Amino acid sequence: MDSAAPREPGATEPPARARPRLVFRTQLAHGSPTGRIEGFTNVRELYAKIAEAFGIAPTEILFCTLNSHKVDMQKLLGGQIGLEDFIFAHVRGETKEVEVTKTEDALGLTITDNGAGYAFIKRIKEGSIINRIEAVCVGDSIEAINDHSIVGCRHYEVAKMLRELPKSQPFTLRLVQPRRAFDMIGQRSRSSKCPVEAKVSSGRETLRLRAGGAATVEEAPSDVEAAAARRVDDLLESYMGIRDPELAAAVVETARSSAGAQAFARGLDAVLGEFAFPDEFVVEVWAAIGEARDACG
């Protein structure tokens, strides 16, 4: 094998090639000029950058979607952003109050949150109590339950509050709906075309946002990891009434570094103890992750 040519005396190492700045395009979902943002590490910082770009308060932003202006929970921004993704920010619209009587144990709501203090409705089950209340829509932020503010609460805390409400007793939800463009008005859970519709990136690299520490550029999850995370997300909805792809991904990541079910349970307690996952949930999750691995070969 040829050896490298000797370096001339006094020669310096060539500088390492710097990664280009990561600049993301963004718009307000109801319509705005295109802004450009950079230099954020977590969701709160992302919202602050978007707010600065459009001259609004960060608290005006309810949630963001990627590559679509629509209130589409499949496009919801989580903890990872493709390097070519277009970010649409959905801001506060009208506030409304609805009275609900809990005639069954389950209301039919699936809750998620934006990582910055707002919990909102991700799914409404067909035929459920909430489904029969026309004013309640996917994407609505839950601001208060019986005039008790829940701003700042995590999704699992809100879901627990709703589960613990007594049956046959009316309660009030104060909701904030996302501001909608003219062509979205009157649509409950789907919305149509707006002036800009971004193309979904085909790249595999993503920016991973972190609650603590710097954001990092990583490869997108493998097919096995993505399948396992979807199964875990389904179990989160079944057991806890929430959907959270980033939480599901964190559970899968914990499983990947665990030698067995008991080690996995200890790992969850250490990393995600605040969620107080029930034992039967942990057992089902470990089995589901194994099934996803087997199904993907």
Image (cartoon, rainbow, N blue to C red):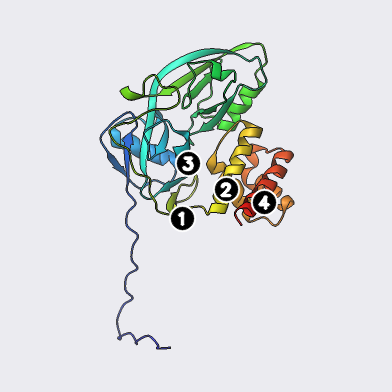
Q: Residue at x 60, y 48 (%)?
A: 228
**What residue did someone put label 2 on?**
227
**For the residues carrying marks 3 and 2, which lies nearer the camera in this image?**
2
Q: Quadrant of residue 105?
A: top right
**What residue did someone put label 4 on?**
290
**Quadrant of the snapshot with the C terminus:** bottom right
Q: From mark 3 to mark 2, how far is it between C-alphas?
A: 17 Å
- Sequence-wise, the earlier of marks 4 and 3 is 3
The secondary element bearing badge 1 is classed as strand
**What residue did someone put label 3 on?**
78
Q: Quadrant of residue 50?
A: top left
- Sequence-wise, the earlier of marks 3 and 2 is 3
**What residue did someone put label 1 on?**
218
The amino acid marked with disc number 2 is: Ala
Res 233 label = none
- Sequence-wise, the earlier of marks 4 and 1 is 1
The secondary element bearing badge 2 is classed as helix
